[in-house]
Amino acid sequence: LPRHALVFGSFTSFFRSVTTSLQLRSSITLTMSAAETSAAACVPGGKCLPCESLDKSHLLSPQQVESELANMKLWKLSDDSTKISRTYTARNFQAAMDSLNDIGKIAERENHHPDMHLTGYRNVEIVLFTHSLGGISLNDIAMAKMIDEEVGFNYSPKWLRENPAAKKE
Protein backbone atom coordinates (compact mmCIF):
# COMPACT_ATOMS: atom_id res chain seq x y z
CA LEU A 1 0.00 0.00 0.00
CA PRO A 2 1.13 3.54 -0.60
CA ARG A 3 2.32 5.38 2.51
CA HIS A 4 -0.61 7.85 2.48
CA ALA A 5 -3.05 4.91 2.50
CA LEU A 6 -1.48 3.60 5.71
CA VAL A 7 -1.64 7.03 7.34
CA PHE A 8 -5.27 7.48 6.28
CA GLY A 9 -6.12 4.02 7.61
CA SER A 10 -4.55 4.90 10.98
CA PHE A 11 -6.46 8.19 11.04
CA THR A 12 -9.71 6.39 10.26
CA SER A 13 -9.11 3.96 13.14
CA PHE A 14 -8.30 6.86 15.47
CA PHE A 15 -11.44 8.75 14.39
CA ARG A 16 -13.60 5.69 15.09
CA SER A 17 -12.14 5.39 18.61
CA VAL A 18 -12.74 9.10 19.28
CA THR A 19 -16.31 8.79 17.99
CA THR A 20 -16.91 5.84 20.31
CA SER A 21 -15.50 7.80 23.22
CA LEU A 22 -17.71 10.79 22.42
CA GLN A 23 -20.78 8.57 22.35
CA LEU A 24 -19.88 7.17 25.77
CA ARG A 25 -19.69 10.65 27.23
CA SER A 26 -22.73 12.15 25.54
CA SER A 27 -24.90 12.06 28.68
CA ILE A 28 -22.38 14.06 30.75
CA THR A 29 -23.17 17.77 31.05
CA LEU A 30 -20.85 20.32 32.59
CA THR A 31 -21.86 23.84 33.51
CA MET A 32 -19.42 26.41 32.10
CA SER A 33 -19.39 29.94 30.80
CA ALA A 34 -18.17 30.61 27.27
CA ALA A 35 -14.88 31.93 28.69
CA GLU A 36 -14.35 28.76 30.72
CA THR A 37 -15.11 26.56 27.72
CA SER A 38 -12.15 27.95 25.78
CA ALA A 39 -9.73 26.81 28.50
CA ALA A 40 -11.58 23.64 29.45
CA ALA A 41 -10.09 20.20 29.73
CA CYS A 42 -13.48 18.64 28.97
CA VAL A 43 -16.33 20.14 27.05
CA PRO A 44 -19.94 18.96 27.09
CA GLY A 45 -20.30 16.02 24.75
CA GLY A 46 -16.56 16.18 24.07
CA LYS A 47 -13.46 14.21 24.92
CA CYS A 48 -11.36 14.95 27.97
CA LEU A 49 -7.80 15.97 27.29
CA PRO A 50 -5.06 13.67 28.56
CA CYS A 51 -3.97 14.93 31.98
CA GLU A 52 -0.35 15.23 30.84
CA SER A 53 -1.38 17.90 28.32
CA LEU A 54 -3.07 20.09 30.94
CA ASP A 55 -1.46 23.04 32.67
CA LYS A 56 -2.36 25.08 35.75
CA SER A 57 -4.83 27.15 33.69
CA HIS A 58 -7.09 24.07 33.68
CA LEU A 59 -7.44 24.07 37.47
CA LEU A 60 -10.89 25.04 38.72
CA SER A 61 -11.34 27.62 41.44
CA PRO A 62 -13.08 26.54 44.65
CA GLN A 63 -16.13 28.54 43.52
CA GLN A 64 -16.26 26.75 40.18
CA VAL A 65 -15.99 23.37 41.93
CA GLU A 66 -18.72 24.29 44.44
CA SER A 67 -20.94 25.36 41.54
CA GLU A 68 -20.44 22.00 39.82
CA LEU A 69 -21.02 20.07 43.05
CA ALA A 70 -24.28 21.89 43.79
CA ASN A 71 -26.20 19.16 41.94
CA MET A 72 -23.88 16.35 43.04
CA LYS A 73 -24.85 16.09 46.71
CA LEU A 74 -22.70 13.04 47.50
CA TRP A 75 -19.43 14.70 46.48
CA LYS A 76 -17.53 16.99 48.85
CA LEU A 77 -14.72 19.47 48.31
CA SER A 78 -11.65 18.91 50.50
CA ASP A 79 -10.70 21.54 53.08
CA ASP A 80 -7.73 22.60 50.96
CA SER A 81 -9.92 22.73 47.80
CA THR A 82 -7.61 20.40 45.85
CA LYS A 83 -9.75 17.23 45.76
CA ILE A 84 -13.33 16.04 45.62
CA SER A 85 -14.43 12.89 47.38
CA ARG A 86 -17.40 10.65 47.91
CA THR A 87 -17.79 8.21 50.80
CA TYR A 88 -20.36 5.50 51.33
CA THR A 89 -20.98 2.26 53.16
CA ALA A 90 -21.76 -0.73 50.97
CA ARG A 91 -24.18 -3.48 51.99
CA ASN A 92 -21.30 -5.94 52.40
CA PHE A 93 -17.75 -6.64 51.25
CA GLN A 94 -18.81 -8.02 47.86
CA ALA A 95 -20.99 -4.96 47.17
CA ALA A 96 -18.04 -2.69 48.01
CA MET A 97 -15.76 -4.65 45.68
CA ASP A 98 -18.34 -4.64 42.89
CA SER A 99 -18.62 -0.84 43.03
CA LEU A 100 -14.83 -0.44 43.10
CA ASN A 101 -14.50 -2.73 40.08
CA ASP A 102 -17.17 -0.73 38.22
CA ILE A 103 -15.33 2.50 39.02
CA GLY A 104 -12.08 0.89 37.89
CA LYS A 105 -13.59 0.02 34.51
CA ILE A 106 -14.70 3.62 34.00
CA ALA A 107 -11.26 4.86 35.08
CA GLU A 108 -9.52 2.61 32.57
CA ARG A 109 -11.90 3.57 29.78
CA GLU A 110 -11.44 7.29 30.46
CA ASN A 111 -7.75 7.03 31.42
CA HIS A 112 -8.46 9.10 34.54
CA HIS A 113 -7.87 7.23 37.78
CA PRO A 114 -9.27 8.12 41.21
CA ASP A 115 -7.77 7.14 44.52
CA MET A 116 -10.01 4.42 45.97
CA HIS A 117 -10.01 3.33 49.61
CA LEU A 118 -11.77 0.38 51.23
CA THR A 119 -11.70 0.20 55.02
CA GLY A 120 -13.65 -1.79 57.57
CA TYR A 121 -14.52 -4.25 54.76
CA ARG A 122 -17.34 -2.10 53.33
CA ASN A 123 -16.57 1.60 53.89
CA VAL A 124 -15.51 3.18 50.60
CA GLU A 125 -13.96 6.53 49.77
CA ILE A 126 -13.40 7.73 46.20
CA VAL A 127 -11.03 10.70 45.82
CA LEU A 128 -10.70 12.59 42.54
CA PHE A 129 -8.13 15.17 41.51
CA THR A 130 -5.90 15.66 38.51
CA HIS A 131 -2.67 14.18 39.82
CA SER A 132 -0.43 15.98 37.31
CA LEU A 133 -1.83 19.36 38.41
CA GLY A 134 -2.32 18.71 42.11
CA GLY A 135 -5.88 20.06 41.94
CA ILE A 136 -9.31 19.74 40.40
CA SER A 137 -9.97 20.05 36.66
CA LEU A 138 -13.09 19.45 34.59
CA ASN A 139 -11.79 15.91 34.02
CA ASP A 140 -12.49 15.24 37.71
CA ILE A 141 -16.01 16.68 37.55
CA ALA A 142 -16.76 14.63 34.43
CA MET A 143 -15.39 11.48 36.08
CA ALA A 144 -17.51 12.07 39.20
CA LYS A 145 -20.61 12.42 37.03
CA MET A 146 -19.76 9.21 35.17
CA ILE A 147 -19.34 7.36 38.46
CA ASP A 148 -22.70 8.66 39.71
CA GLU A 149 -24.49 7.72 36.48
CA GLU A 150 -22.85 4.40 35.62
CA VAL A 151 -22.00 2.57 38.84
CA GLY A 152 -24.61 0.30 40.39
CA PHE A 153 -24.14 1.01 44.10
CA ASN A 154 -25.53 -1.46 46.63
CA TYR A 155 -25.55 0.62 49.81
CA SER A 156 -25.98 -0.46 53.41
CA PRO A 157 -29.67 0.07 54.29
CA LYS A 158 -28.71 2.03 57.41
CA TRP A 159 -26.30 4.27 55.46
CA LEU A 160 -28.96 4.83 52.79
CA ARG A 161 -31.52 5.95 55.41
CA GLU A 162 -28.93 8.41 56.77
CA ASN A 163 -28.03 9.66 53.25
CA PRO A 164 -31.28 10.07 51.32
CA ALA A 165 -29.47 11.99 48.55
CA ALA A 166 -28.03 8.63 47.47
CA LYS A 167 -31.44 7.34 46.40
CA LYS A 168 -31.65 7.36 42.62
CA GLU A 169 -34.78 8.90 41.15
Image (cartoon, grey):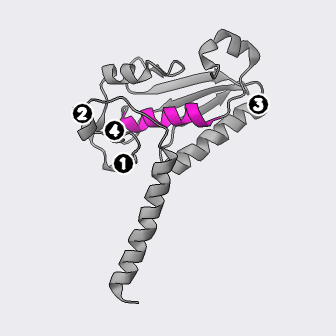
Instruction: Please state if 10 lies on the left or on the right of 159 as rendered.
Output: left
Q: Which residue is pictured at 39% across the width and 32% down the height?
A: 30
Marks 4/2: CA distance? 23 Å
Q: Nearer the viewer, residue 164 or 94?
A: 164
Whether residue 39 is visible to the viewer of this picture, yes or no, is: no
Dot 4: what SS? loop
From what the image shows, is residue 19 above or below residue 45? below
Name the quadrant containing residue 43: top left
- CB contact under 8 Å: marks 3 and 4: no
Q: Indicate yes or no whether the magenta region holds residue 142.
A: yes
Mark 3 or mark 1, which has the lower sequence index?
1
Tell me, yes or no, whether the two marked residues, 4 and 2, touch with CB atoms within 8 Å: no
Q: Label 3 belongs to which residue?
A: 93
Give me the residue at 40% from left, 48% from top.
47
Magenta region: 137-151
Which percent across, then down, holds residue 124? 64, 27
Q: Secondary structure at mark 1?
A: loop
Residue 159 drawn at (x, y percent):
69, 15
What type is the residue that disc 4 sits on?
Leu
Classify 6 as above or below 124: below
Query: Neighbour class for label 3 at 10 Å: few (<14), some, many (≥20)?
Result: some
**Residue 49, numbered circle:** 1
Q: Which of label 2 and label 3 is nearer to you?
A: 2
Horizontal placement of 77 versus 39: left or right?
Answer: right
